[in-house]
Image (cartoon, grey):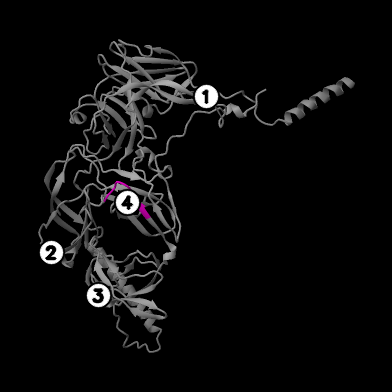
Amino acid sequence: MRYWNSIMFFAVALLLAACASIGSPDGGPYDEDPPVLVKATPVLGATGVQTAKITLEFDENIKLESAFEKVVVSPPQMQMPEIKYAGKKVSVELFDTLRPNTTYSIDFSDAIVDNNEGNPYENFAYVFSTGEQVDTLAVSGTLLNAQDLEPIKGMVVGLHSCLDDSAFNKLPLERVSRTDSRGRFTIKGIAPGKYRVYALADANQNFMFDQKSEAVAYLSDIIEPHAMPAVRPDTVWRDSVTIDTIRFVNYTRFMPDDIMLRAFKVDFTSQYLIKRTRDTHNKITLFFAAENKELPQIEGLGFDFSGAYVLEKSLKNDTLVYWLKDSTLYRNDTLALKLSYRASDVDGNYFDQIDTLYISAKKRWENVQKQQQKKYEEDVKAFMREAKKSPDYDEENPPAFVPKTKLLPVRFSGSATMDVDGTCKFSFDEPLLSVNPDAIHLFKKVDTLWVPMEHIFSQDTANIRKYDLFAEWRPENTYKVVADSAAFKGLYGGISDEFTREISFRSLDEYAVLYVSIAGVGNNGILQLIDASENVVKEEKTVNGRTSFYFIRPGKYYMRLIFDNNGNGKWDTGDYEKGIQPEHVAYYHHALDLRALFEYSQEDWDLGKPLNEQKPLEITKQKPDKERRKMNRNATRNFK
């Protein structure tokens, strides 16, 4: 019995020990080491290579991540290489014929990782040469979107030793790289010589700029790659937060390593008629792919179309609305039109295009009339039901039904509380046939009285269905806008009802003021105050490098500067064919937290700051990829 009790005591002790340590068994320290290349066939840096198949073997099982995105072969291959991995090996087979006396590089970036922990074998490039030597020069830099300084990920950057401008259009790039999430690139395996640098969003994968729709960038200067000895600090970490020592390491610096490219798309879209619509019988809309420098010519087939419409145009004439005036015309379910305009092909060649259009309304006119008749009959019945409720109703002499006048809706953009620099606009669903300016009134509230005041009511220059109300608005004042009945008459007979709206303007105490001074800008700057989504809140031109923003609502803002070299009041893209770089853009390096009742002055804008360091990270949409290296995770673990 004593022996049996001892066994039970020992079992219970084991059970309690197990319960005191709940969790999975400790599997030992994390694997924080990247894979190690142990064998390459042909050997790394081999010369006189004739085989197009390469095998790499590592000290542990590996896998490839995002190989299509990250692995770049240079010179670029017209036929896609085959890249495979299995176990500890990676194989690459090139299908293009190997060029004589050429250095090849297969840049894996950080695509090779160990199979278990995903530790990357970083910045690895396999190189070999079909000639007697391996070219070792390299150049690097950054590619940004020219308009907003966003880093561009995955864009091809390459070199041409042929210095003719036409080489970019006719010959594939000779050596290439691809940008990472920061827009950074490094082109390796370069032979000594002079080169031009290009970037290309290569839609058809032929490594040349032969489509105007492709985004491009180019360096105006010719570069000459070279190397020089240099020294850099190397930090040794004791743990994830504590520095052990800083030592200085000799290395070879490849130059230039600060190339800055600004990508843009040429301001070109093939011109053609996208579609035409006729949602209602009285309105025809034509949608074009690009701006019409001249208005298209339109003729009726079998009828006179000239003067039969009111034309509503978009700013670039790429959307044209023809409001038909004659009911005998728009009652036709289908209209045949002859359209003549300047079209273009994908290469930008313009020609005269003539189209015959048969434009049908969505609903047949017969059905529209039936709906109108049904609505009329329902209105008559409703009228008679109400009339019969009256004690004066006479069955033998019932009252006559008078159709209501068609109502023209009036829309007003002014809000109950307005900014001091806000605008008041009227808008309508159709063009107006007439406006009675004497029926539009504006009053200012003085104590308890409404006092009439001067104002201007005029048609908007950009939209024929919008009208502006201008007046000498004052902060902390209340106004009343009144439009009498029939002040507006629509093209199709609608009459406006009486309209009244009260509006109040904010106090100056609710705003901030910002004064900005930028050395070296002069009068050719457009300064934009933008929000976190990069929407333009306010915009002003610089005068001697200075500008001011008034009536700013409290909040967080950022600043963007456009160097308006041609003075047309907007940012302009580049044109490689004409040798024109896009206009420069700069960002103020941090946010502005503006508060009401404060005046701010900014004079520390450093335009010499590198472009890739200007835009604040919080409004940069293309964020850097997260660092995947597992930094000393074992430091916080205890192993027995």
Q: Which residue is mark 2?
A: 307
Q: Which residue is mark 1?
A: 116
User: Is residue 516 rendered magenta in the image?
Assistant: yes
Specify start and end residues of the magenta stretch as a single range.
Answer: 515-522
Q: How many marks?
A: 4
Question: Badge 4, how many Cα within 10 Å: few under 14, some, many 20+?
Answer: many
Cα–Cα gap, marks 3 and 2:
26 Å
Q: Earlier in the sequence, mark 4 or mark 3?
A: 3
Q: Earlier in the sequence, mark 2 or mark 1?
A: 1
- 450 w.r.t. 431: above or below: below
| Amino acid at dot 2 | Gly
Secondary structure state at the residue bearing disc 3: helix
| Residue 52 in sight here | no
Q: Which residue is mark 3?
A: 437
Of circles 4 and 1, the one toward us is: 4
Of circles 2 and 1, the one toward us is: 1
- The x and y percentages for residue 268 are 21, 43
Q: Quadrant of the C terminus?
A: top right
Q: Main secondary structure of the magenta part?
A: loop
